[in-house]
DNA sequence: TCTGGGGTCCTAGGACCC
DNA sequence: TCTGGGGTCCTAGGACCC
């Protein structure tokens, strides 16, 4: 059996952990740059505040309902997430951390009383971390996702739903729209509706082989999973990333080359850190810049750059990112976003040596290791070109304190 | 004025080879 | 007039996820 443990309105719940005065009140969290709403507490959902809508369009509505609004505070969410994942790891045989706020647990033998197990898990995490979760259990991942959805939406379930045999759930599946299925997004939903498949039940009852021909292999697997045949296994030890992207929209439009230089330098630095963290090297990077996609004539350019040898040295990656920037920069564009992508990542062990080309030296590696160590200890070491802020910096006007990751932000208990 | 970021997988089509 | 077939690899774009 697969069990999906999924935090409820995760970012909004995190903001409430150190703000008990906001319990039971509408809370929303914004994306980077305070762009869109990405999380809503149940009270905010009940006010019909839409998900993924731009903040500026909803401002008056939010003010009218006295909704507490927060910028994203990833340091806080990541820390709370890792504490929850540690608890889940203790509670299960095997676990796949699927995203910041959810994990699949797997049991080879059925737990004797799954509903009770789910309730206990939920109670433990609430008691230790003060984050509410929902639990869905079923013979496949897709069904566990569905069970979790039912656990979240049906008050009868009290946050836990177990699907043992699909045939017992036909009536419920007939009432659930097909887009609630994991893996069926907007485009597929539209195509499915054209052939009169509207509910989860409709999809479940189709012929997987025929559906593969008409749609694709993903849809086929989903149908099989809905019928209780596992097609997706547990991914306990995810492979290292194949690519690393670091990009941001700017706090406001920028036109100066110097601002873009700083931003690209900061992104290249961050990307190189991520690369070293997974012990990778790259030879190829891509830099892209763009104006807003809402512009009448959007400008978007990218440039692929090859480094002379496999590297994870911030200085080299940054240097080649700047060279790439040279090719995509156009005077007069109001830039809204830029980014650095590291592609073709290879492990730093066992790299093909080239007799005639320079390699990354041991000294370079030691310098990078030293920088990374300094960073984990909170020492502000960096390169002169890379400034932490500028006119390109992200907007986060409503960020909560870093309660768990910054000494100066740790809450003080008053006697 | 203001519209997120970071991933993966699949497919179709082109280039190239024999 | 008539111009193969099958395989691999790469890339771009689409779709999906949270």
Image (cartoon, coloured by chain):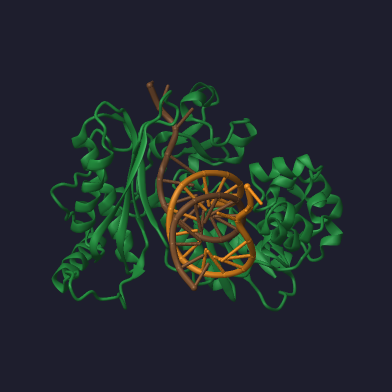
Chain colours: A green, B brown, C orange
* Horizontal side, residue A192 vs residue B3: left or right: right
Name the image quarter holding the N terminus of chain A: bottom right
* Horizontal side, residue A1 vs residue B10: left or right: right
Residue A42 pos. (x, y %): 61, 40
Query: Which quadrant of the view contains residue A350?
Result: bottom left
Residue A400 pos. (x, y %): 38, 41
Residue at the image point whose x is 54% and y is 36% from the top: A52
Query: Which quadrant of the view contains residue A311?
Result: bottom left
Query: Which quadrant of the view contains residue A346?
Result: bottom left
The residue nearer to you, when weighing A332 against A183, is A332
* Horizontal side, residue A190 vs residue A123: left or right: right
Residue A225 pos. (x, y %): 73, 63
Residue A48 pos. (x, y %): 63, 30
Q: Is residue A143 visible?
A: no
Q: Is residue A50 visible?
A: yes
Establish if A19 lies above or below A151: above
Q: So how many labels did they put on this image? A: 0
The residue nearer to you, when weighing A251 against A126, is A251
Residue at the image point whose x is 70% and y is 61% from the top: A221
The residue nearer to you, when weighing A159 against A218, is A218
């Amino acid at each position: 059996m697969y069990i999906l443990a999924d935090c409820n309105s995760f970012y909004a719940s995190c903001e409430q952990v150190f703000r008990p005065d906001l319990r039971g009140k509408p809370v929303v969290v914004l994306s980077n740059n305070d762009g869109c709403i990405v999380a809503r507490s149940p009270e905010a959902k009940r006010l019909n505040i839409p998900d993924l809508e731009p903040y500026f369009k909803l401002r008056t509505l939010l003010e009218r309902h006295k909704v507490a609004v927060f910028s994203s505070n990833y340091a806080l969410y990541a820390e709370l997430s890792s504490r929850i994942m540690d608890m889940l790891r203790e509670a299960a045989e095997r676990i796949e951390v699927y995203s910041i706020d959810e994990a699949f647990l797997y049991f080879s033998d059925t737990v004797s009383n799954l509903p009770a197990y789910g309730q206990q898990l939920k109670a433990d995490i609430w008691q230790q971390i003060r984050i509410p979760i929902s639990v869905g259990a079923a013979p496949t991942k897709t069904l566990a996702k569905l069970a979790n959805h039912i656990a979240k939406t049906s008050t009868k379930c009290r946050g836990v739903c177990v699907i043992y045999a699909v045939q017992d759930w036909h009536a419920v599946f007939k009432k659930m729209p097909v887009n609630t299925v994991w893996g069926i997004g907007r485009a597929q939903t539209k195509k499915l509706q054209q052939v009169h498949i509207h509910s989860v039940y409709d999809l479940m009852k189709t012929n997987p082989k025929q559906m593969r021909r008409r749609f694709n292999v993903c849809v086929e697997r989903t149908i099989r999973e809905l019928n209780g045949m596992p097609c997706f296994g547990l991914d306990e030890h995810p492979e290292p990333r194949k690519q690393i992207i670091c990009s941001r929209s700017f706090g406001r439009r920028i036109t100066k080359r110097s601002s873009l230089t700083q931003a690209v330098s900061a992104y290249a630095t961050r990307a190189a850190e991520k690369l070293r963290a997974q012990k990778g090297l790259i030879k190829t990077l891509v830099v892209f810049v763009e104006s807003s996609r809402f512009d009448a004539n959007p400008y978007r350019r990218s440039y692929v750059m090859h480094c002379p040898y496999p590297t994870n040295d911030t200085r080299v990656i940054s240097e080649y990112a700047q060279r790439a920037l040279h090719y995509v920069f156009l005077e007069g564009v109001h830039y809204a976003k830029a980014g650095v992508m590291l592609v073709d990542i290879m492990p730093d062990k066992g790299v093909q040596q080239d007799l005639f080309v320079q390699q990354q030296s041991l000294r370079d590696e030691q310098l990078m290791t030293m920088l990374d160590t300094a960073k984990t200890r909170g020492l502000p070491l960096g390169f002169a070109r890379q400034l932490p802020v500028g006119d390109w910096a992200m907007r986060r006007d409503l960020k909560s304190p870093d309660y768990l990751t910054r000494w100066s932000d740790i809450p003080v208990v008053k006697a």
